[in-house]
Amino acid sequence: MRLYSFELSPYAARARLAVYRKGLDVEIVEPPEGGPAGEAYRAINPLGKVPALVLDDGTVIPESAVIVEYLEDRFPTPALLPRAPEDRARARLIARVAELYLMPALHPLFEQFFAEPRDRAKVEAGIAGVRKALDQLEHFAAGDGWAAGPDFSLADCALMPVMFAVTGVLGGFGESEPLRGQPRLDAYWRRIQDDPAVARVTAEMKAGLAKLMASRR
Amino acid sequence: MRLYSFELSPYAARARLAVYRKGLDVEIVEPPEGGPAGEAYRAINPLGKVPALVLDDGTVIPESAVIVEYLEDRFPTPALLPRAPEDRARARLIARVAELYLMPALHPLFEQFFAEPRDRAKVEAGIAGVRKALDQLEHFAAGDGWAAGPDFSLADCALMPVMFAVTGVLGGFGESEPLRGQPRLDAYWRRIQDDPAVARVTAEMKAGLAKLMASRR
């Protein structure tokens, strides 16, 4: 299998974290010349986004959420979902809130990060939007263990890369304790750093970030 | 179980279609006084959106995609997912493209629908955006049967209400054959109208639309 990916993309990182936790043999590459919106890549994934998983028979599976569920269906051990339907729902919910509420709340801050001069009102509104989404996530997150309960799950695959982005961006705007209002998420974020797969994805995202920052200088 | 729902919401309709196809006993109600953003409902679902499914023990499951997967896990017959991992991925992908690419592409047109006067450039850009998303969906849709293959699946739960919205909105802007460029989706949309659960959700969405139009007069 081949995974189209960018180091810094939290969506690609979500798929990579699932791949690493399951110990799968997957070739990880960037989109071909022209980038994700280019003609060559759109012939592979018409949605024009990373990640996309290409199976050995050529079948293309786009969208990080779909890729992770596919890997779980196809390679069920080690599991990325608990057994009980209610626990599975909680894991999927946390993944969705991370992807569709928290991550989009960062976009106004991404824009302001490189803006000269920064618009203070937009920065403050952006930080407030991120805090609101963090509060929503805090409501659903487990109090100990992994994001959705005692075991690593697809909730962690989705949440970990977004937390990397959130803490990095809020830190970049001078928030020294970015999770001070969300004690569950704060403890979670500290707790998971030593996991080898999490550490590997963190290192990849840091490398991607360093390249981005160098390109903007 | 209780489902918080609005007749016209394509997200709530997605959950209702799963409930009807599975023949489940679910009480369907609107959010309490104050609406989905109000305090009473936010105490139930902090995301402030319909649908939300409340289980008999009080557990709340928000987000239509999560609700449908939960119903599938908890009440597996009749199934809303095929057996093969690749087929399951296709069903989930179509559901996602309908929800996250096609439905958001309608928003600029919703705004213009009640605008006086309408902004012709925005209408044209809006229609082009919807056509682009329809093309993406056309790429992944099955050529016959249901949205993702021979059997009804959670792809249909997500796609049917969005198709109701797309054909209605494009029709409202004078597009007499809104799916002329997407023959698979066009044939699909005609083919599924006689299914009892589809017809029921269609009637509910029409009733919701009639109320909306009356309130705008």
Image (cartoon, coloured by chain):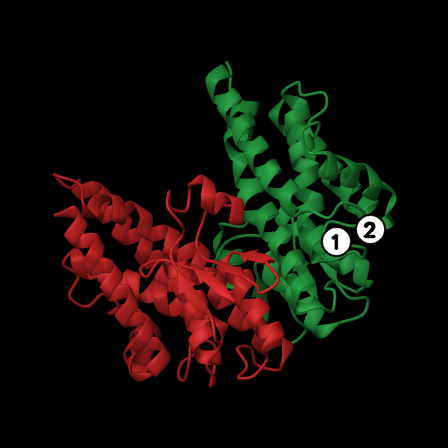
Chain colours: A red, B green
Q: Nearer the viewer, residue A209 or A190?
A: A209
Snapshot quadrant of residue A194 = bottom left
Residue drawn at 37 percent across, 46 percent down: A33
Q: Which mark is residue A80?
A: none
Residue on which the image places disc 2 = B197
Circle 1 chain: B
Q: Which residue type carries mark 2? A: Ala
As displayed, is residue B205 above or below residue B30? above
Snapshot quadrant of residue A5 = bottom left
Q: Split into 4 quadrants, where in the image is the N terminus of chain B?
A: bottom right
Residue drawn at 72 percent across, 24 percent down: B177
As displayed, is residue B201 above or below residue A93? above
**Left or right: where A17 falls relative to B26:** left
Q: Position of residue B14 (x, y in %)?
A: 68, 52
Residue on which the image places disc 1 = B17
Q: Which residue type carries mark 1? A: Leu
Snapshot quadrant of residue A133 = bottom left
Of the residues under marks 1 and 2, which one precedes in the sequence? 1
Task: Indicate the secondary structure of the residue bearing disc 2.
Answer: helix
Q: Split into 4 quadrants, where in the image is the C terminus of chain B?
A: top right
